[in-house]
């Protein structure tokens, strides 16, 4: 079951359910489609847990709060959910928002299993309270850099917005490419229009342009400008953050949506569990589920396993991260301490570089796996 944001004074107080707080971007400027896919995975797993008897006979309840990609809203939501007595927090897609949520959860002693945010510095200091399913940005983006080099790209332009996440991505790419002869040319999107990006690409002699910008804008406008500039017919456009994963990308760009490589966290072949969940998610979403929906499902699978074995005590849940050993939709899930990462980390989910097939943009091609 799912609890929508309640009116004042309408919170449940009978304690009959085991409650998990869920943080999601469900309104703009958050990436709403990602939030919807994440919620679909969370809700499907909650339903299956309850169909199987719940948590030692008690139903699992999801208490949903919309972060709208706003760190301040996320911090307020964590405080509220902690007061409501949730056993743990789940979710969030946007890295900067998840980092704020992790900081508050750590301060409050509230377990937080982050589903989908990848920023390496999810926590500034080592914490026992936070674990993460998504791979760290440095892991996935290094794989993406290796793909670029393997495809023959050594002069790479990045159209970058201003944020901690995009700056971190540019730095990871530069650090990975430079020792191998690659060059990263940064195009500051605070100063450039999509049309001006085309001129800068011609001047830079870059063979690839990476979109380190928000979705749908300015990403969609940049793609349209570059794809329709006759000077740039040979340039490769890439989107390591995964903008082309969702159906809205293909809807907005049509044929221009294809052949733009991005990172996706799925195996080449799903296990029987993954295939069953994929079918159920497709029915729930009325479209192909993204990797983000699988992350949502796996989040609840982990938390349900911990709550069944350790109860609702928050400290005992936090102590359980290194003991987790379950089969997720994308492989066996275990958490460990990873150098440079201050939270308990699944190291690693499967990582692919994929794109939409130009011959059939609703299908994906696997270009590289790490």
Image: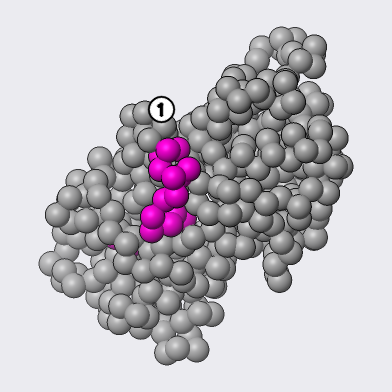
Work out whether 332 lies above or below 300: below
The reply to whether residue 68 is in sight is no
Q: Is the residue 244 above or below the residue 91 in the image?
A: below
178 falls in the magenta region = no
Residue 313 in sight: yes
Across and down, in percent, residue 177 comes to 46, 81
Compared across the picture, whether 280 is left or right of 76 comes to left
The image shows residue 181, relative to residue 28, as above or below, that is below
User: Horizontally, is 16 left or right of 266 in the view?
Assistant: right
Task: Return the residue nearer the eye: 248 or 266.
Answer: 266
Count the numbered circles shown.
1
Helix, strand or loop under label 1: helix
**Badge 1 density bin: few <14, some 14–19, many ≥20, Cα 10 Å:** some
Image coloring type: one colour
Q: Residue at x 57, y 62 (%)?
A: 348
> What residue is shown with label 1?
284
Q: Residue at x 80, y 12 (%)?
A: 14
- The residue drawn where x is 14% and y is 54% is 359
Residue for point 66% across, 56% down:
334
Residue 276 belongs to the span the image colors magenta: yes
Give percent across and percent down for residue 4.
59, 19
Report x, y in % for residue 226. 23, 62
Question: Which region shows up in magenta?
Answer: 260-278
Query: With 220 as the anchor, is 80 left or right in this view?
Result: right
Quarter of the rendering occupied by the N terminus: top right
The image shows residue 21 at horizontal and vertical percentages of 68, 31
Depth check: give the residue in front, 53 or 164: 53
């Amino acid at each position: 079951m799912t609890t929508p944001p309640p009116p004042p004074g309408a919170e449940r107080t009978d304690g009959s359910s085991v409650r998990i707080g869920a943080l999601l971007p469900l309104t703009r400027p958050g990436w709403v489609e990602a939030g919807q896919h994440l919620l679909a995975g969370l809700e499907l797993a909650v339903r299956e847990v309850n169909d199987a008897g719940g948590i030692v006979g008690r139903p699992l309840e999801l208490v949903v709060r919309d972060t709208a990609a706003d760190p301040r809203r996320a911090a307020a939501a964590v405080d509220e959910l902690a007061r409501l007595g949730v056993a743990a927090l789940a979710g969030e897609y946007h890295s900067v928002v998840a980092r704020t949520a992790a900081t508050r959860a750590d301060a409050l002693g509230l377990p937080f299993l982050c589903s989908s945010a990848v920023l390496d510095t999810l926590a500034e200091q080592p914490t026992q309270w936070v674990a993460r399913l998504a791979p760290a940005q440095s892991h996935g983006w290094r794989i993406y850099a290796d793909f670029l080099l393997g495809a023959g790209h050594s002069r790479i332009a990045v159209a970058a917005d201003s944020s901690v996440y995009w700056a971190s991505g540019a730095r990871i790419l530069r650090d990975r490419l430079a020792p191998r002869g690659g060059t990263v040319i940064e195009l500051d999107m605070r100063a450039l229009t999509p049309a001006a990006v085309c001129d800068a690409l011609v001047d830079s002699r870059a063979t690839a342009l990476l979109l380190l910008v928000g979705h749908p804008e300015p990403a969609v406008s940049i793609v349209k400008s570059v794809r329709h500039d006759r000077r740039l017919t040979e340039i490769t456009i890439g989107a390591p953050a995964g903008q082309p994963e969702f159906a809205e990308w293909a809807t907005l760009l049509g044929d221009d949506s294809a052949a733009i490589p991005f990172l996706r966290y799925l195996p080449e072949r799903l296990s029987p569990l993954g295939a069953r969940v994929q079918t159920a998610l497709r029915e729930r979403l009325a479209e192909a589920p993204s990797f983000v929906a699988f992350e949502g499902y796996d989040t609840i699978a982990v938390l349900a396993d911990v709550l069944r074995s350790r109860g609702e005590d928050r400290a005992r849940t936090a102590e359980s991260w290194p003991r987790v050993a379950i089969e997720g939709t994308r492989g066996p899930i275990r958490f460990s301490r990873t150098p440079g990462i201050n939270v308990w980390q699944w190291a690693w989910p499967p990582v692919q570089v994929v794109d939409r097939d130009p011959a059939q943009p609703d299908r994906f091609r696997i270009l590289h796996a790490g």
